[in-house]
Image (cartoon, rainbow, N blue to C red):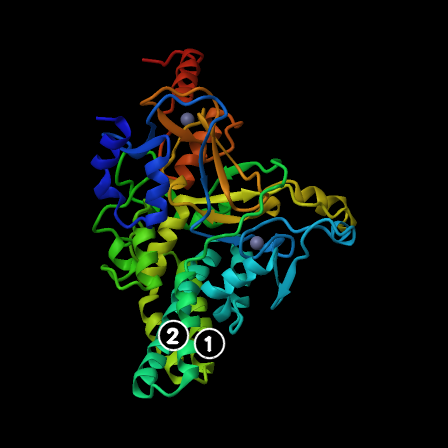
């Protein structure tokens, strides 16, 4: 049997929960999912792959701009917006401002509105944003976006149900029919597909990272139980952050259930109770903001639908989401326009650290790449937005595992090992690390007996 088919069928069980579009993408990709005895899941080449070949182009399941650059990138797709000078020259599409957020195009704005932004426009995440700034965190804002997707869906579904009821009660009301069809459009496009205008340069670099060191402290290695020898510490049933906490099983078509399936597919960190303090704090802020929006609603059904959705977004849900974001989120690093008017120090600071990041994004297939300090796959963002392109960094033979790097691979052995253990909870046994370790041992002074 053909390798792709063999691997695809053998791993079918593990792939349950992935959206059909992702499964279709996997079916035609030149790689397949494989379970490794000692390293969990990974991707292997299903045929010989040429240097420079594009293996996968993936749009994020969810993404969020970094706080420091939110005025410079699209709030929905993270596309770098044209500078005022470029806008004056009339070169690019004009960004749209809505509720103090910027969108690259009207289609991004309407995708956002259909998914989370209608509800988000009616509440304030300011407190949560301040919390993120204080802790150097970025994951709570992605969790908030997922929560908004679920809550907005619950809200509109309840209103839609009410309209349907009214429709069947009185066939004479033509307005009811109009309302229903527009709600249907909303439901179809609720899991947002990002629009991708891709004619930008490929100056964007990539690092897959957890949140800043400071926020990673909340998940220090001592509080994480290493549950497998896998490249990423993967949770087991029974841990605090299991799949069940994500939400209802089954197929009721709700966004809550879709998010539960998609995120349930990802590996996660074991977070023993109680959850880290800042997580509980952030969850409280999010829940408060959403509850206030429910209280403000004039329409009774919408308020009830929102209220019901919020019950599923409890602290357990939040922990389960965060435990996945910590291991699977990519940092989308952009060559953003530097504002030298802010002074040299500020401008220089932009060039390093989180300030250079357009935002964070979660990819379902992209999350299956394991780590190596000598990766054979590179990730870039050639559209200057959150669409990730995975390219072969060298020739790859059929059956070889595919690796990306989760860290700055330019670092020394010790620094790499330390960061990987700290942020991802594993010791790297890649070829490069093994060779360098051996080399290091040769130069160690002989041990005293
Ligand atoms: Zn956009
Ligand atoms: Zn390594």
**The C terminus - image quarter:** top left
Q: Are marks 2 and 1 in contact (CB under 8 Å)?
A: yes
SS for callout 1: helix
Identify the residue at horizontal 65%, vertical 51% (top origin): 81
| Mark 2 to mark 1 CA distance (whole Å) | 8 Å
Q: Nearer the viewer, residue 411 or 244?
A: 244
Whether residue 151 sits left or right of residue 88 in the image: it is left
Query: How far from the left and from the top, in percent, is residue 212?
Result: 51, 46
Q: Nearer the viewer, residue 271 or 288?
A: 288
Residue carrying label 1? 293
Query: How far from the left and from the top, in percent, is residue 179?
Result: 43, 77
**The N terminus - image quarter:** top left
Q: Is residue 324 visible?
A: yes
| 389 vs 193: above or below | above
Q: Earlier in the sequence, mark 2 or mark 1?
A: 1
Query: How far from the left and from the top, in percent, is residue 317?
Result: 33, 60
Q: Is residue 36 visible?
A: no
Identify the residue at horizontal 60%, vertical 68% (top origin): 99
Q: Please tell me how crowded label 1 is: few (under 14), some (14-19), or many (20+) other residues with Cα within 10 Å.
A: some
Residue carrying label 2? 306
Numbered tag placed on residue 330 in the rendering: none
Is the residue indicated by label 2 positioned so its CB lies within 8 Å of ligand 1?
Answer: no
The quadrant where residue 303 appears: bottom left
Identify the residue at horizontal 37%, vertical 34% (top origin): 29
Identify the residue at horizontal 38%, vertical 56% (top origin): 276
Query: How far from the left and from the top, in percent, is residue 232?
Result: 34, 38
Q: Nearer the viewer, residue 346 or 173?
A: 173
Q: Quadrant of ligand 1?
A: bottom right
Q: Nearer the viewer, residue 233 or 335?
A: 335
């Amino acid at each position: 049997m053909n390798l792709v088919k063999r691997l695809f069928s053998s791993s079918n069980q593990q792939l349950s929960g992935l959206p059909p579009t992702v499964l279709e993408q996997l079916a035609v990709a030149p790689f397949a999912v494989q379970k490794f005895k000692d390293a969990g899941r990974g991707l292997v080449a299903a045929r010989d792959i040429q240097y420079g070949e594009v293996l996968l182009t993936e749009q994020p399941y969810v993404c969020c701009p970094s706080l420091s650059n939110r005025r410079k990138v699209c709030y929905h797709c993270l596309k770098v917006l044209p500078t005022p000078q470029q806008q004056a020259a009339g070169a690019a599409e004009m960004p749209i401002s809505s509720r103090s957020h910027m969108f690259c195009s009207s289609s991004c704005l309407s995708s956002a509105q259909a998914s989370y932004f209608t509800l988000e426009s009616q509440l304030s995440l300011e407190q949560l944003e301040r919390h993120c700034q204080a802790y150097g965190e970025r994951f709570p804002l992605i969790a908030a976006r997922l929560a908004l997707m679920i809550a907005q869906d619950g809200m509109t579904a309840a209103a839609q149900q009410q309209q349907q009821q009214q429709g069947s009660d009185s066939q004479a009301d033509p307005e009811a029919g109009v309302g229903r069809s527009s709600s249907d459009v909303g439901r179809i496009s609720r899991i947002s597909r990002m629009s991708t205008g891709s004619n930008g340069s490929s100056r964007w670099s990539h690092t897959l990272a957890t949140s800043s060191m400071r926020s990673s402290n909340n998940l220090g290695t001592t509080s994480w139980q290493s549950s497998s020898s896998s490249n990423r510490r993967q949770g087991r049933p029974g841990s605090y952050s299991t799949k069940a906490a994500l939400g209802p099983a089954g197929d009721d078509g709700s966004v809550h259930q879709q998010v539960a399936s998609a995120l349930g597919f990802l590996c996660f960190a074991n977070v023993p109770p109680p959850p880290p303090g800042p997580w509980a704090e952030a969850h409280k802020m999010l829940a408060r903001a959403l509850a206030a929006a429910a209280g403000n609603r004039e329409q009774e059904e919408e308020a009830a639908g929102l209220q019901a959705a919020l019950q599923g977004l409890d602290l357990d849900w939040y922990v389960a989401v965060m435990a996945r974001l910590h291991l699977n989120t990519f940092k989308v690093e952009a060559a953003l326009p530097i504002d030298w008017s802010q002074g040299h120090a500020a401008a220089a600071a932009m060039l390093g650290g989180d300030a250079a990041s357009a935002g964070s994004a979660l990819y379902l297939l992209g999350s299956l790449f394991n780590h190596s300090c000598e990766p054979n796959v590179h990730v870039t963002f050639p559209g200057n937005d959150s669409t990730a392109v995975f390219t072969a960094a060298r020739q790859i033979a059929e059956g070889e595992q595919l690796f990306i790097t989760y860290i700055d691979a330019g670092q020394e052995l010790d620094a790499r090992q330390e960061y990987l253990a700290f942020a991802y909870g594993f010791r790297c046994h890649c070829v490069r690390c093994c060779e360098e370790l051996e080399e290091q041992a040769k130069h160690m002074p002989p041990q005293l007996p």
